Image: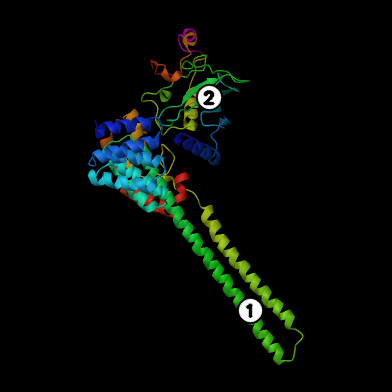
Amino acid sequence: MSHARRLQRELQKMHQDVPVPGITMVNTENFTQWQMDIEVLDQNPIYHGKTFRLNFKFTENYPIEAPEVMFVRAIDREIPMHPHIYSNGVICLDLLSSGNGWSPVQSVESVCMSIQSMLTGNTKNERPRGDEQFVLGAGRSPRHIRFVYDDPTV
Amino acid sequence: MAMKADELKQKGNVCFQAGDFSGAEKFYTQAIIRDSTNAAFFTNRALARLKMEMFEDVINDCLKAIELSPSNMKAYSYLGQAQLALNHPSEALHSSMTAYELAITQRSPSVASIAAACLDAKKKRWEQREEKRRERECQLMLKMTDIIERDADRAVDELLKKGRMNNGNINISEQEEEIRHEAKERVRTLEDVFGKAEAVRCARREVPDYLIDNITFSIMLDPVITKNGHSYDRATLLDHLRRSQTDPLTREPLSEKDLIPNYALKAASDLFLKENGWAVDW
């Protein structure tokens, strides 16, 4: 139950505080899944004029346990091109890994901001190596995929 | 051949697991008849009785268990729950806090739920106090209304007396009406003032950020400070450390023994909760 309390407080805070530019709540009705839209605000040609949708899945142990965060397709919502984002929406980001990457002081908003800045800083209009193979073999929960963070430049 | 106490306890446990609390209670009672020196028999029966809402009996079992084993965390925890159910929040808080201290030293996984019970007792204690305060204020209001009305009655009496002496002056009923009107106005003002005080009390319901745990976003019961100077609630931080031995902010290595109690912040939180029990659910 404490995860519902915490999410409720996150919502309250987001409604109260000044909204972060480029981050919008789409669906925050329940305490198992939220959808958030993010936009890249600078002139980065890869993402200019596009909006992307993130899906957050929470377990009862949130925020001790990391949420499962993926990009999802919808009307006018594509999966952003990025060397760490697979074409099925899986994001390879240390912050979201259930190892030591995640920290319970993170929130939905802070995760959105991290992903937003991950897109902002990207210059490569490409998918990760082995994307096709990965997407074929996927079906597992992204939380359990062991990524190798082999490229510190992106 | 008669069954041994331990076997009876086992039978009780089987019933309890199956949700048959009254069956479990009977077996524990038989176990206690065979051997009344085993604290676990009493705490097990207390838990079964807690489920059956036999709160007075829970208290007796817990006190007996504590007598047999003074640092029995379960006994204090069930004791607190029963006391709270019987509407004795101050006693419940004392028992739950003792259970909490024992849970910390015994590294029990129930720390978080016992911490929640402590906060609950604090909230109930505040609610009880609030109720008394409201009752007092309500009574004061009635008393003052009564005084105003009696004051008006007296003024009217005097007016009538004066009227009889002056052989029935024409203005009497007009003046009487004025007195009654003034009294009504006074009562209305009084209600207004009392109402405003209550509204102000309810409007300022916000917990200051420094009392909020950065993990649960709720008020802290037992703040501990990490090496970088940030404070967290002990129960939640222990939960995090079981998963990852890192500082939540810096990700530097952090273990249970690095945590230092933040007594000043704890005092601030205690004081705040004493005056603002609603903060538990905030």
Q: Chain of mark 1?
A: B
Residue A45 coordinates in the image, percent (x, y):
56, 19
Closer to the camera in the image, B273 or B230 = B273
Closer to the camera in the image, A117 or A38 = A38
Residue occupying the point 24% across, 47% down: B67
Residue identifier under label 2:
A55
| Three-letter amino acid code of the residue under disc 2 | Asn
Q: Chain of mark 2?
A: A
Report whether A116 appears left or right of A50: left
Please tell me the numbered disc located at residue B153. Answer: 1
Prevailing secondary structure of the magenta residues: loop
Is there a contact, CB below 8 Å, between mark 1 and mark 2? no
Where on the picture, by quarter, is residue B128? Answer: bottom left
Residue A30 is a magenta residue: no
Residue A127 is a magenta residue: yes
Give the extent of the magenta segment. A126-133
